[in-house]
Image (spheres, rainbow, N blue to C red):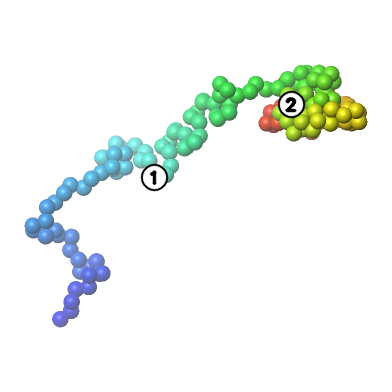
Amino acid sequence: MTTPNPFNSEDQTSVPAPDAPSFPQASTPGYDQANAAPGAQQPVYGQPAYGQPAFGQPAYGQPAFGQGAYATPPKQWIVALLLAFFVGFVGVHNFYLGYTTKGIIQLILSLTVIGMFVTGIWAFVEFIMIIMRYGAYGCDAQGRPLE
């Protein structure tokens, strides 16, 4: 005589015991294939439904973070050029473009007589770079081109 193997699914039957209550199967709304409308697309776990933005992404047509009502307007090329020409030795044009480290260095250097000479040459070189839109001076610190 062989004993039934509890790990063998062929020996098991799915008939409940006569005294066990039977409960209806719970279905999750939106995931039930049997109750789905014909041709309806079922959502996949972990992915947004078709046409919906992913978590952390803006909805279509909505501005992304940092591009909404509080975003800074694009910087003007002519303003950067004039600042570099007239007050460039103190680094005001670098503050305007968002390069605060360069601006602080130029501001501190301009407090001495020798530093004023150095920052004057430095500002003139940056003035030429802004005219030619060369390198980093064609864009602001966020990488947006100057208008």
- Compared with 70, 12 (above or below) is below
Q: Residue at x 77, y 29 (%)?
A: 103
Q: Residue at x 38, y 41 (%)?
A: 43
Q: Which mark is residue 95?
A: 2
Residue annotated with mark 1: 45
Q: Residue at x 81, y 30 (%)?
A: 108
136 sits to left or right of 25: right
33 sits to left or right of 18: right
Query: In the rendered image, which quarter contains the N terminus?
Result: bottom left
Residue 124 quadrant: top right
Query: In the rendered image, which quarter contains the C terminus?
Result: top right
Seen from this angle, which residue lies furthest left? Answer: 19
Q: Where residue 27 sits in the image (x, y, percent)?
A: 25, 44
1 sits to left or right of 51: left
Quick one: 133 or 50, which is closer to the camera? 133
Q: Where residue 24 sits in the image (x, y, percent)?
A: 17, 47
The three-letter amino acid code for the residue at tag 2 is: Phe
**Crowd around label 1: few <14 · some 14–19 · many ≥20 (10 Å):** few
- Compared with 30, 5 (above or below) is below
